[in-house]
Amino acid sequence: MGDLGKIFKAYDIRGVVPDELDPAIAEAAGAAFVRVTGAKAVVTAHDMRESSVPLSEAFARGATSQGADVIEAGLGSTDLLYYASGSLDLPGAMFTASHNPARYNGLKLCRAGARPVGRDTGLTEIREMIEDGVPGYDGEPGTVSRRDVLKGYAEHLKTLVDLSSIRPLKVVVDAGNGMGGHTVPSVFEGLPIDLVPMYFELDGTFPNHEANPIEPENLRDLQAKVRETGADIGLAFDGDADRCFVVDERGEIVAPSAITALVATRELAKHPGSSIVHNLITSKAVPEIVSEHGGTPVRTRVGHSFIKQTMAETGAVFGGEHSAHFYFRDFWFADSGMLAALHVLAALGEQDGPLSELLGEYTRYVASGEINSEVADQDAAAAKVRDAFAGRPGVEIDELDGLTVSDESAGWWFNLRPSNTEPLLRLNAEAGDEATMAEIRDEVLALVRAK
């Protein structure tokens, strides 16, 4: 079976195909998933990678060998799979490696109602069962059937956001040859949108650019096309289309924190006084704006399992991360880049001003973006930074997730946290002005990178 420890991550299974992840592992995962969940039926979907169909078929063989029926939704985005799991009330399996390069593939699992399966919620059990050999099953095997859920998914999203009275908008969408090319046409159908599609051809080799919009170079084509066509807005989806990045009418990249704040105010208008979850490296503007709109901001660690768990515990109506993952209570607490995009289109289309003006009130600070530094000893480097700032007047330190250092009176903060998978420290800094942010950023980087 190879090194399962390498491909079983915190939230999913992911690795190079076929060296690390192959149909044999997928088949065993299907069998183990049914045993761990006790499912009588499961729903699957897959992205456009060449290896996705063979892996999903192998998974189905494993699941049916344990007596479970498999409903194949076929091609879909990850949030389409969450819709299928939620609406059918079945456990689900999505075959995708999201934004990873072409040679990768993976498997995201959820329980009925799109509830996440991670390291502490079943993934470890599944891995151990595969390693030990999945026990046989002597009953009747399950059946495999197909069900097209794309139309239902598109219609459901449009019941959650009122787009009935928006003005006509010109919208450029860069699907990055990923699953947005499959889902966007159905979702936008019937809306007053002049769609300018970019890279809608489904191609798991990603011939135009990596389907990873968190990297600014992957947004350059979209920025240029928005300026060239005079569009109102640009949207970029990652490979499995569960994340969405926004570009304004000037071709400028919009910080996901501004989108979090915008959607939060819209959800608070519908559900006054609700909780809104944000991770600790979203802009300080997010909790401020949530409080100003009568909501309760709730701060969490980075990572979708923490966001979803905290949302469930607090009954939060919405959650946002700096990485452009957006979570909705009305969407089974799952994340959907498409639903966030519809909120932005609705907000833009309900008024006459340009997007840059609309988002101005949600953008209050200057952020560094995430800066990675390769270090041999993450703990030692972080301790050096901690010692340098500890004891300074007005400085507060907390360690909810990595190291967060802030100075309320000076108006700056930074977070330094280790990568789970690589020898990296990730820095995010924010301040009220560019000079202060640069000063803090450069001081921390000098300490981290000192030989």
Image: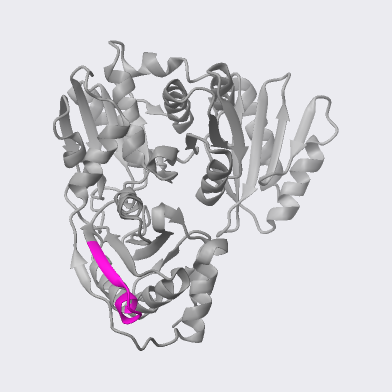
Decide: is 115 above or below 251.
below
Circle count: 0
Residue at 60% x, 58% y: name it.
423
Q: Nearer the viewer, residue 234 or 27?
A: 27
Q: Which quadrant is the N terminus positioned in?
A: bottom left
User: Is 227 on the left-hand or right-hand side of 408?
Assistant: left
Q: Which residues are magenta?
A: 62-72
Does 130 sit left or right of 385 as displayed? left
> In the rendered image, is residue 221 in sight?
no
Name the residue nearer the viewer: 183 or 199: 183
x then y, percent, for residue 144: 22, 71
Q: Position of residue 283 (x, y in %)?
A: 55, 29
Q: Is residue 221 above or below residue 141?
A: above
Q: Which quarter of the figure has residue 254?
A: top left
The residue closer to the viewer here, 243 or 249, is 243
Spot occupied by residue 231 in the image (x, y as percentages of width and height): 22, 23
Which color scheme did the rendering employ for the protein? one colour
Q: Which one is in front, 75 or 274?
A: 274
Q: Is residue 75 visible?
A: yes
Residue at image location 44% in from the left, 16% down from the top: 360
Residue shown at 44% from the left, 86% from the top? 135
Q: What residue is drawn where x is 32% and y is 49%?
A: 83
On screen, residue 151 above or below 235: below
Q: Where's residue 176, x and y in %? A: 26, 46
Q: Is residue 73 magenta?
A: no
Pick out the residue farthest to the right: 391
Figure quadrant of residue 66: bottom left
